[in-house]
Image (cartoon, grey):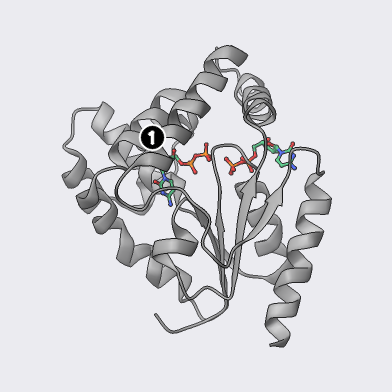
């Protein structure tokens, strides 16, 4: 893939990838793709009775808009369909073309630095303790009025991390050249500032 400047951001559930990615995209004027939404949209269609491979091949922009994609049920189904090679293959070209945009792009997910954009100019692996991640996601979901408990959210996060890390195809793991950012005790602004420095340094190279 040739094209613009690509920032690849991977990490486990609710580590802060999306928040950091959006801030970086705004700062540098890059386009942003939340690749988790693609798998969530396929998961939602499967919960509605569609075959995963068919759902992945037929995915359209409108399918990514629904608020329901944020529910824990959809997140679990996303993680299940994400283990299927046919589903991942059907979503690869779209992600790679997005990454190659002339104006620069930030993509976040699980396999961006390892599989989708191994040539990305900057790769980050964002982590935080499971307890802190569950607390943050719990605050987010309950703030949206969803009926969840902290215990359920922690169980959801741990189950997805385990499935995502141990699957055969494109497992969740840091690329060899990824910079780790642990946000357990790091404020969003500090995480973003660290990432901005890394990107600026890469742009000068
Ligand atoms: O995209 P990902 O699932 O990795 O996480 P996120 O949606 O960016 O972050 C999950 C929640 O944690 C959001 O409500 C963020 O505002 C919050 N967060 C935080 O409190 N401190 C951080 N350093 C990073 C994220
Ligand atoms: O926001 P959060 O980190 O909780 O989840 P997400 O990024 O929306 O991803 C939902 C699920 O999609 C993950 O648990 C993974 O199983 C899958 N996924 C993936 O396999 N590869 C990606 N590049 C992005 C998401």
Is 9 above or below relative to 154? below
Residue 32 image-quadrant placement: bottom right
Q: Quadrant of ligand 2?
A: top left
Is 29 above or below relative to 102? above
Residue neighbourhood size for the residue with mark 1, other residues' Cα within 10 Å, grouped as few (<14), some (14–19), many (≥20): some
The answer to whether residue 58 is seen in the rendering is: no
Q: Position of residue 177 (x, y in %)?
A: 57, 68
Specify whether 44 is left or right of 58: right
The number of callouts visible is 1
Residue 89 image-quadrant placement: bottom left
Residue extending furthest toward the bottom: 205
Specify whether 132 is left or right of 14: right
The residue nearer to you, when weighing 31 against 173, is 173
**Which type of secondary structure does the marked residue at label 1 adopt?**
helix
Would you say the beta carbon of the disc 1 residue lies within 8 angstroms of ligand 2? yes
Residue 160 image-quadrant placement: top left
Q: Position of residue 123 (x, y in %)?
A: 59, 65
Would you name the residue on which mark 1 appears? 163
Specify whether 193 is left or right of 23: right
């Amino acid at each position: 893939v040739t094209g613009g400047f690509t920032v690849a951001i991977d990490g486990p559930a609710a580590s802060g990838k999306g928040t950091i990615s959006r801030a970086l995209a705004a700062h540098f004027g890059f386009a942003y793709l939340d690749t988790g939404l693609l798998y969530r949209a396929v998961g939602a269609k499967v919960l509605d009775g569609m075959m995963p491979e068919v759902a992945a091949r037929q995915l359209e922009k409108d399918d990514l808009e629904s608020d329901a994609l944020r529910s824990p049920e959809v997140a679990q189904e996303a993680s299940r369909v994400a283990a299927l090679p046919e589903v991942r293959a059907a979503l690869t070209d779209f992600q790679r073309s997005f990454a190659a945009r002339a104006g620069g792009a930030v993509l976040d997910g699980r396999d961006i630095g390892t599989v989708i954009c191994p040539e990305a100019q900057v790769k980050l692996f964002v982590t935080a303790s499971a307890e802190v991640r569950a607390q943050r996601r719990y605050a987010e979901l309950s703030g949206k009025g969803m009926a969840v408990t902290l215990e359920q959210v922690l169980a959801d996060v741990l189950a997805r991390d385990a499935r995502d890390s141990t699957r055969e195809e494109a497992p969740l793991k840091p690329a060899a050249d990824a910079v780790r950012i642990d946000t357990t005790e790091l404020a969003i602004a500090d995480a973003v500032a660290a990432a901005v420095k890394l990107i600026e340094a890469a742009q000068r190279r």
